[in-house]
Amino acid sequence: MGGPPGSGKTTVGSLVARSAGAALVDLDSVTTPLVEAVAVLVGEPVDLDAPRFVALRDARYACLATVVADCLGTGVDVVAVAPFTREAVGGTWSAWGAGAGASSVTTCWLSVGEEVLADRVRARGLARDLAKSGAPVRPAVVDPAGVDLLVDAGDADPGAVAARVLAGWSAGR
């Protein structure tokens, strides 16, 4: 499940995973504590988009893929949550999932308007968001042909968004 910061990936992904009996593997949960520690060590704010941390992106996604593969190896379906902005172009997202060992991959992009994203990011007040304060929050542009499910996540009710994701996921299985 991908989308821009504030799109509801973790909240909706958690609801989908719980309903499907799948494991939730979230990029932020898997890697952010380590990235925050590195930021402190090098004396930088925790801005994952800062030029100094761009090199960590591939390593973060490699960590995510390893944990996803571990879960899949035990026979557990996985809902992987990350921005997946690069992967949502040209079908590379499905290849990423297959590379992690998934026999079936359904990609889902949560789309949200700019104002809703800005409100959500401001409300959650995470250090990685505060490091970018003042920078406009813009929805990432995704190629609809590169994803299986394009879901409007602007609802105030994450349960309704999760229901749409589950319906699309079930239809594609």
Image: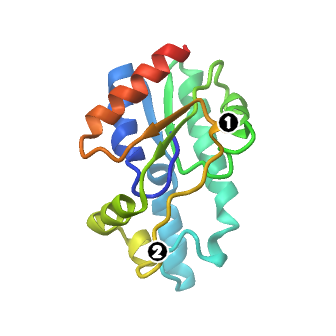
Of the pair 105 and 154, the residue shown nearer to us: 154
Instruction: Point out residue 131 in the picture as x, y percentages from the top left corner.
Output: 44, 78
Q: Is residue 80 above or below residue 40?
A: above
Residue occupied by mark 2? 136
Instruction: Point out residue 171 in the picture as x, y percentages from the top left corner.
Output: 49, 14
Number of marks present in the image shown: 2
Instruction: Point out residue 112 in the picture as x, y percentages from the top left corner.
Output: 42, 51
For the point 61% across and 31% down, the residue is 69
Instruction: Point out residue 158 in the picture as x, y percentages from the top left corner.
Output: 29, 40
Residue occupied by mark 1? 145
Q: Is residue 111 above or below residue 163?
A: below
The residue furthest bottom is 43
**Which residue type does callout 2 highlight?**
Pro
- Left of 103 or right of it: where is 90? right
| Colour mapping | rainbow
**Which residue type does callout 1 highlight?**
Ala
Residue 87 visible to the viewer: yes
Q: Is residue 5 above or below residue 99?
A: below
Q: Is residue 33 above or below residue 92?
A: below
